[in-house]
Image (tube, rainbow, N blue to C red):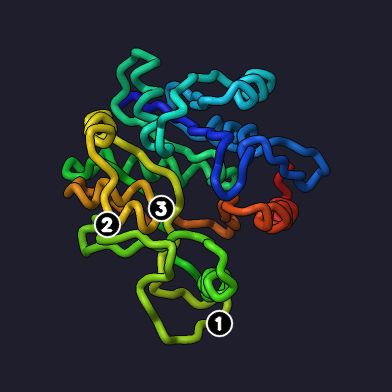
Amino acid sequence: MSVLIAIPARYASTRYPGKPLATLTGATGETKSLVQRSWEAACQVAGVDRVVVATDDERIRDAANAFGAEVVMTSPECANGTERCAEALDNLGEDFDIVVNLQGDAPLTPHWFVENLVEGLRNDPEAHVATPVLRCDGAALNGFLEDRRNGRVGGTTAVFAGNRHALYFSKEVVPYTGTTFADADPTPVFHHVGVYAYRPQALERYRSLAPGPLEQLEGLEQLRFLENNTPILCVEVDARDRQFWELNNPEDVPRLEEMMAHMGMA
């Protein structure tokens, strides 16, 4: 099955304008933009036929071209990364069996997260979309709760049924648990990793659907699928002692740089 990775990169982010061009300094002191680090992460994924950056901004296009990425220009009217991936697929004019949305704010995404995700979609013919989830240990859960206490939007959490099809995603911490966990303890809370694999038909249908109330309230694009009865497979992945975080706010930059230093990422 042929696989395309598209990296949607929008300059006009509400919470963090210019985020794809924000820089992160690695363990060796080398500084690279967020979009470059995301592209490098995509290029490490096995079994991928093509990797493109999908943007509507000339500054991002020029920066991506400078480090050797293929760029597909898309409309500024795309409301989110899923819509941008759908338009990028149209503009490429090529058929792929699976399209992966590796969002440009997740440069620490390990290659096996995406590989497991593609394999999960291949093995579940009932699922139209697949996305990774990572079981939180106590340290991660306590970090989420601390963010919420301080009014910050941290990671997204996911709950799913016995067949691993998603029930809900939220920027709140769900499910509720009153238990206090030690840092190394496993918890019943799953961190949703912002990567998606779609069947092309699901992408095409997505663009024809209006955003529903849950998507608008939470600001989570994947809820449009759930609100329209499109099954999303949650694939549990193993961090293998790798740290993972998305860049959601400017305050996340030092957190990511600390993680990169700890893991020895250049």
Quadrant location of the C terminus? top right
Q: Residue furthest top?
A: 93
The image shows residue 87 at horizontal and vertical percentages of 37, 24
The image shows residue 197 at horizontal and vertical percentages of 35, 39
Which residue type does callout 1 highlight?
Ala
Which residue is disc 2 drawn over?
A: 166
**Residue drawn at (36%, 31%) of the image:** 99
Which residue type does callout 2 highlight?
Ala
**Residue drawn at (33%, 52%) of the image:** 215
Element under label 2? strand
Give the camera-side residue of 123 and 50: 50
- Residue 182 badge: 1
**Crowd around label 3: few <14 · some 14–19 · many ≥20 (10 Å):** some
> Vertical placement of 250 versus 191: above or below?
above
- Which tag, 3 or 2, sits closer to the chain's start? 2
Q: Report the side of 33 relative to 199 (left or right).
A: right
Q: CA distance from mark 1 to mark 2?
A: 27 Å
The image shows residue 222 at horizontal and vertical percentages of 33, 48
Total residue callouts: 3
Give the camera-side residue of 201 and 46: 201
Which residue is disc 3 drawn over?
A: 219
The image shows residue 56 at horizontal and vertical percentages of 51, 25
Element under label 1? loop
Instruction: Choose mark 3 or mark 2, whichever is in front.
Output: 3
Give the camera-side residue of 46 and 259: 259
Q: Report the side of 221 relative to 266 (left or right).
A: left
Q: Residue furthest right?
A: 29
For residue 167, which quarter of the picture? bottom left
For residue 43, which quarter of the picture? top right
